[in-house]
Every structure is written in C-alpha cells, then in structure tokens.
Amino acid sequence: MSETKYTQEHEWIRIEGDVGTVGITDYAQGQLGDVVYVELPAVGKAVKQGGDMAVVESVKAASEVYAPVSGEVVEVNDELTGAPETVNADADGKGWFVKIKLADKGQLAALMDKAAYDKFLAELG
Amino acid sequence: MDARNTHKDSPAIIGAHPGTATGNRALMIEEQLIFEQGEPQRTGVDLPEPPKVTDRLGGLARKTDLGLPGLSEPQVIRHFTRLSQKNYSIDTGLFPLGSCTMKHNPRLNEKLARLPGFGDIHPLQPVSTVQGALELIDTLAHWLRTLTGMPAVAMTPAAGAHGEFCGLLTIRAAHEAKGDARKRVLVPESAHGTNPATAAACGYEVESIPATPRGRVDLAALKAKLGPDVAAIMVTNPNTCGLFEDEVIEIAKAAHDHGSYFYCDGANFNAIVGKVRPADLGVDVMHINLHKTFSTPHGGGGPGAGPVVLTAALAPYAPTPWVVHGANGFELIETPEGPAQASVGRLKAFNGQMGMFVRALAYMLSHGGDGLRQVAEDAVLNANYLLARLRDVMSPAFGDGPCMHEALFDDKFLEGTGVTTLDFAKALIDEGFHPTTIYFPLVVHGAMLMEPTETESKESLDQFIQALRSLAEKAKAGEAAFFQAAPRLTPRRRLDETAAARKPILRWRPPAPAQAAE
Amino acid sequence: MRYLPLTSDDRRAMLGAIGVKSIEDLFVDVPTSARQAKPLDLPPHAGELEVERELAALAAKNLAAGQAKASFVGAGAYRHHVPAAVDHLIQRGEFLTAYTPYQPEISQGTLQMLFEFQSQVALVTGMEVANASMYDGATSAAEAVLMARRTVKREKVVISAAVHPHYRETIETFARYSDGEIAVNAPDPTQDENLEALIDDQTACLVVQNPDVFGRLRDLTPLARACQAKGALLIAVVTEVVSLGAITPPGEMGADIVVAEGQSIGNGLNFGGPYVGLFATREKYIRQMPGRLAGQTVDADGKRGFVLTLSTREQHIRREKATSNICTNAGLCALAFTIHMSLLGSEGLRQLARLNHAKAVQLAEKLAVVPGAKVLNQSFFNEFTLRLPKPAAPVVEKLAADGILAGVPASRLYPGVNALANDLLIAVTETATEAQMDALVAALKGAV
C-alpha cells in the first residue's frame, strides 16, 4: 500500500516500498502560476532532507524544490522538460519530479499526512 | 468617436483592428522583420573594389553564406523609424518608473559626445595624444568626489551592477590584505536584485535583513546579524521604498564597530545630489549611475556607466586603469604596478564609458553646483506632490511622512475590486503614460513605485494625477473587466509570456525549404 | 536652469498642496549633521554656449584618428566608417530615451530590434542563439568562462597566451574569488601555441581568440575536438567582428560559446566605451546564459510580438542564485550594430571584409622596404605584427608627434615581456588610403 506525506514547503512524497515519488502540491502549482521550466537533478545524485533537489520556474518566479527525505535519486520525470505545463495540469500525478530511494524511513515521521497538510493550508489562509 | 471614452464597448471591438486591408492603423504601421524584407544581392553600402592581392587567410576563407538580409538605405531608414514609433520614451511623455530616474536627456550632451576629439579617439593611442580625454575623466572624477565627499573614485565600471561588483571586490581585497577572511554580506530584503547577485559573484554568502513597518532597515535586526565574519552591509539610501534611512549614521557605525564596510547602492542619488554628501553618512563605497542622476540616455537598456566612489582605505584596490597626474601631464596606469599594485585588476577591456563621461560632465557643467542642488529639491518636491495628491484615492505604503524622490503605493486601494497592480499599470498605458515600477520593492504587496524626476512640469504632473485618480475611481466602481482587457490601444496587446518561456524562440530562422529538397 | 520646468510659483503652490512650509520640511529624515547648508564648492550653472566651449577645448587637446595623418591603431578597437543613417536613427528619441523594455506593449520597437540583433549575431558567429548583448567583448569573455564553469561543473580554465591581455585580465578579475587554476602559456607570435597539452579532465574551458591578438588566424577545429574529448567547452573570442565576413566563423569550427566585441559594426572608437559585447552559444545551454534575451510570442489578438524572456535566470528574480549580476545590456550600441549590419547585408559585409583584408595585405607588402623590419604573421585578417629592429614604443611616440598613429606596441599590452618589445601591432581598415600607408612606410623607414 502507498502512503503520501507532505512538507511545509509544499512537496508531496508517495512511498512504495523503499522508494518515494516526489512532486509539488496542487496548492504550490497554483501559487506559482504557469510553470515554464523544471530543472531536475541527475539520476544517482544524493539528496539531503530539506536540501535543494530541483527548481521549478514560472514566468516571474523561480522556486527551489526541497528533498522531503534523504536518499538517492533513482529516476526523474523527463517528460516535464518538454511539457512543464503537466505540473499545472496534474501536480499530484503525472507532474511528479523525481523518485528517491530512501536512506532512512524514520525521516517520514517528521512529515505531515493529508489531514495535517490540509489543516496547515487552511491556517495559511 | 473617441475610443478612450467608450470603455463600455466590448474590449474585443476596441482591441481588434478597425478592419483595414493592411492591418495598419494610420500612424501605427505593421513592420516585418528585416529578414522578411531582404534580398541577398541588395546592399545599403557602396564600397570600392579592393586592391588585387593574394589572400593570406591561411585557408580559413568563409565558405558558407552569411544568411543576412540585404536592404537598401531607404528600406533601412523606414524599418527602424517604424520600429521606433512602437516605443514609449521620455521624449514622448512622463516615464515615472521608480528606481530608474527617467529624466530628460539633454541634446547638448549628445552633440558634445560626438566631437571627433572624444568620439574618434582610440583607447590605445599614445597617452600624449589623448591628454584632453584624460583631463575630462579627471574633471568628472573631481565633480563626483566633491558631490559625495569621498576621496577617491574608480571610473571604469560600465553600469550600476558592474559598479557593485567593483565595490565588493575592493572590500574583499581590503579584508584579505588584513588576513581577515570574512564570509557574509548583509542585504536588506527590499534591495535591488543586483545586490545579492553581486555579493554571490564575489564569493559571499548573502543574508537578508528585514524591514521595519516604517519601511526602513531594522537596526536591531541588523545589529543582531553583524559579527566578525560580516564583510559588508549593502544598503540603498534613499532606499527602494523612496525613504531616507533616518538611522543611516547608526547603521554605518554598527557596521564599522564590527569591522564591516558600508556599501551604499547609489541608484537613488538623484534625491540628495548637492544636498547630502554620502561621506557624511559613513559610507565606505558607493556606485553612481551616470544614466540616472547625471542624465545619460537609457537607450532602451544601456549602455550605462557606474563609477564607484571609495574611502582612502579602499582606494588602493580600485580597478585598473587609473588616470593619474604625472610629470608630463596625465598618465594612465594600465597594470597593477606602482601606486596601483594592490588593484583588483581590470573590469572591462578599456578605459571606461568615455561616451557617457562626456555626457555626464556636460550635464554637471550645465547645472553647476547650485543647479544640482535644485535638481534634488525639485525631484523630491515632485514626488511628494504626487504622494499628497493621490493619498486619498490610492494607498501610500508607509504612513503620513514625506518621501524622497519617489512615492510608493501598495494595492490596498484595489482590494476587492478584482483589479491587480498589473491590470492597473496596463490601463495607465492606454491613458498615454508609461506605468510606474510595479511589484518592486518586494516588501510591499502589489507595489507601485513612482519617480517623476525633476524634469516634469507641474502641468505634466497634474495630467498624470488626473489619469491615476480617474483610474482608481473606475477600479473602485467595479469595472474590473475594463482593466483586465487593457491595454487596447497599443501596437500589441498583452503578450503571452508563458508561451515565450516554455518554447523559447530567440532568433529568426529561414522558413523550412519545400519538402522536395529532402 | 533650462532643464528644470518648475517656477517659484509652482514650487510654492506644490508645497502648499503637500501641506509643508519649505522644501527643508521634506528632508526631515536626513540627519541635520549631514545636510549641506549651501551649495558645494563647484562652479555655478552655465549656458549651452559656455559648456560647449569648455568641453570643445578639452576635445581639441586630443588627436582624433580621423584628423591624424594616418591611423593604424587596433588591438581590440577598430576605426571603421559608420554610415550616416546609423547615427541618425540611434538618435531618434524613441530609441535613445526609452528604458529597458519591461512593458512589452509599448516597447515593441526595442524588442523587435533586439530579436533582429540576436539573429544577426547568431548568423555571423555561426552559432544557434545569442543574447541581447553585454557591456563589451572582455566582459562577455569573462561571463563565458563563468558560464562554462557552471555548465560542466569544473573549475580549471585554460587561456591562450594570444588572447588579448585585457580580456585575460578581465577574466581573471571576474574569476578572482572562485577556486580553480587559470593556465596560460608565455606569449610568442613566432610560433604556434600548443594548447591541447593544457586541456585535461579537470578543465572547464579553453579560451582562444581568432584572429588572435597578434593578428594570426587558426583553424579551431582540432582544439574543439580536443575539448570535446575531455568534456571541456571551447570559448572563441573575436575582437574584430568584421573578420567574420571573410573567415570561417567559430561556430562552424566547433566552438561552444562565441564572444565578441561588436564595436567595429556601427560604433565609434569613443576612447574605449561604450562598446557592445556579443555572446552566442548553442541552444542546449540557453538556461546557463547570462544577460537579457528577447523572444518571440503572440499577443492577446494572436499577432506576433516580442518580450524579454527566460528572466528567471536573472538577478531581479533569482537574486543570489542568478547566472550573472548583469542588469542591463548595451542597448543603443546593439541598435547601432543592427542598423549598420542591416545596411551591409551578406553582400556588404563580405565586401567590407575583403576590402579590409586586401588593404592589410597591401600594407604588409609595402612594409618589406623598412630595413630590419619583418611581418611575423603567416596568416592574418586586417591586423598583423611587425617586428622592428628596435623597441616599438619609442617609435610609436615619435611618429605620433608627427601626427601618425602607427599602431599599438605589443609592450603596452604585455609590459615586461622583453621578447615582444620590438613588436608593433598594425591594423588596416577600409578607412586607410594608399597615401596614408605610404606615409607610414616612409615614417617607419625614417625612424628605424
């Protein structure tokens, strides 16, 4: 069974076995506006929880995407390079960024579940 | 029927062409790219037949076609004249772009920069043949030193950001000369983007200082972040909110107490020129945008010039070349040696933006010490007049006090109207004005920063105020659709920037040849 | 004060509307100790006539190249004829007094011009894309080195000894506070430089100039291959852009980035500035490029239009993570370049380049009669190195006193390099007449 967790920086991670698929939330894509470019890390890159992982750009803004967990990048979504608008159309699904092989599943405990993230968004106003 | 008074018409009707066969609209003439008008055999120059020689190109003669279009002189003149007519400019009207100081560009400056004795001299001619040019640089340097109270000035930087780079290089060199490797530079969150970008280019980590609710640097927060590893603070004064940093002397002192230098971003020098000398505020280094305060033309985005004034402690590190007084007149020190041995080196190929120096000095001589002081006073007066006359219908970002040379508003007055700052700016275009700076500084929501400069008459300001007031009232009257469809009367309506960024087309390419070729 | 429209009555009325008594009430935030009570010690305002007189007197103290008996000064800045239409058009107020085209609906003139400029630069350099210009050729070169380091994520830089020393120094200044070695050979105009040996698997880029500072031409193809084999980028510098009308462009020889000084087309000498830096590269590197870019798009009515694009690379959005701190381009100089290039077209640029080359060959042949002097170049475009039998700098001084600008002594660019003390760089453009060439030859014969 997969479970999805969220960060305060509006990334999501869906866990299947010891690999997590990471993207930005629908709220985040809405804040950014039309996404025009996504810069993805190289496969094999080691990332650290909370560290820089990718960059997502709209016309007027560029935002860092942080790694929700530490681990190694095992796959990236190359389709975003040619079709960055997928992030706007389907942030939770086809608009995923990378897959990370988790170094420490214990780190997931620090993240929010869906209910907690929704509450977090509600508090942002 | 005057289209400006018929906003109730559907935007589609007003925005679309009124049905001409050509797509032109009287003076607004559609113009193709030069590449779509050219013929390969045609040219706009007549050159003599070259002398007969055996070529010495070493087998590297170009074999491929250049692919440039060929046009005659009348076609070229018409093309660029038509293009020019699609631009707004200071010569056209009020250009209240905050932070940019779009003042009148005197034509005397243009004339003098074109004198052969300035425009037709080579940077590597013998120094004995360019004594007048070096004297001009020296005279301009004297004016800049006098106006700032600073003892030295580096003349070579080509623009404001290049000047920032120059300034931070001297700071880093000065610290390193003392064996003091510092790591951090503090920059207010309201700063121009060039400040953090420059600090990073000089190998520093950048830390942000918050603003107070009064739109000034938070002195307590600054003090908390200062420490033995802070190389410099970079503060714009007057700041990007159009306000004077009233605690600037304390800010400078706090930095100096920690051995840090005070870099002042001089983008807004126009507000205080002749009235306040940055040296008296504790500034260690400051760039001066000759294309702002000293009236050299912006030219659609450059060239600029950004000389940097320095304290005696930083002067030894100024970039080469240096103009110095020697036994036989002026001399040029071109490499880090002798008095320039500690220089950070060369910032560009040659001596600085000479063409801009001539223009800036012509402007200074025209105004004189007395006129420059009047410049600052009128610039500040004009901005405060806008602030006072718009206060009741728009929303000033910071309280009741006076501003310096620019007035800053936020978008509170648009709350609930469905009109954004961007929409409001675009509607101003249809009224015949260039918009204000929008969404900068970042610390103010939906910012509109307006800088009229001293070269606007009261009548011109009154017309601008009238336009802004009527737009503000229209927004509050619930006419959001009017704003969202603006501009309607421009050569092009809103452009699709998303498409431009997703699939960049950055150059013309010849149309694909017919399939038969393959 | 002819630039100030406000009258005393205006000022009084405006202070009243603001609700203050005097102008000093608007400067209350300035600490009293820092306010100047009276005008600074500078001359008072002056009329057009007086200002013109004063600056014309300074201009008269210089020897303008066009007023000299002859001028052969080059080494990175070249005196070409600029058609009258160029200066007329760049002085149109709508170009001259416009700002950066941040509001595209009322800036299509500047934006379309920049798009045409970028297209022209890409075509003449043989590259895929170009930006909207940099400050000058040297800063373009420095930015290219920083871009190469970002792109290949390595630090070592190899610079040919025959890259203009001012360009090398500018690169060194820009790279001063980043790690990584900068490798340079000793300059020698008499033999080919072995650069391949300096490229290793730590190298980010090789910087070469063509024609080089001594005027020599070099096939860059083997260097491009050597760079590619090690995963480094080849940066080609061009200081005389007219040469691209006659010689194979760096893009066709495998360069990854081409930077150039564009002054030769449309722009005067101006004692060194303002000039216009050209910057071209391959499409795959555009997001690593510094500087502004104009791009094509459509407006709300579906009509073609132009905007500034990919600005998320730039400082006003990316701040400390920007590709460069540059916040401007050389707009008006780029406009002059574009207008002049439009007048030339393929045919005009080709003819202009042929004319420059033929005149340079002609002068090189004439110089054979100067005793003890020798042209060192096997190949050249419009500039070559003449080795004199004695130090070149005093000879240049002596000829300048007689109104002849003979060229640039190599010692001015390479101070302290004794092997180059006798070398003189001589540039010949279409502006040189045969009589001027003969005057130079006669003067050199007399001086050596």
Image: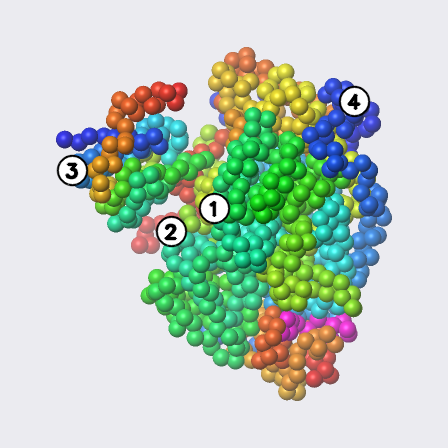
Q: Horizontal placement of B261 versus C234: left or right?
A: right
Residue type highlighted by circle 4: Lys
| The disc label shown at residue C21, or none | 4
Furthest residue toward bottom: C371
Can you identify the residue that label 1 sits on? B205
Q: Which residues are magenta?
A: C399-412
The chain holding disc 2 is C
The stretch drawn in magenta includes residue C402: yes
Which residue occupies 48% across, 70% down? C184
Mark 2–mark 1 distance (CA, rounded to whole Å):
29 Å
The total number of labels drawn is: 4
Can you identify the residue that label 2 sits on? C284
Residue type highlighted by circle 3: Gly
Which residue occupies 25% across, 26% down? A113
Name the element at disc 4. Answer: loop
Q: Quadrant of residue C153?
A: bottom left
Label 3: few (<14), some or many (≥20) within 10 Å?
Answer: few
Residue type highlighted by circle 1: Glu
Between B126 and B252, which is closer to the camera in this rendering? B252
Q: Position of residue B339 (x, y in %)?
A: 67, 64
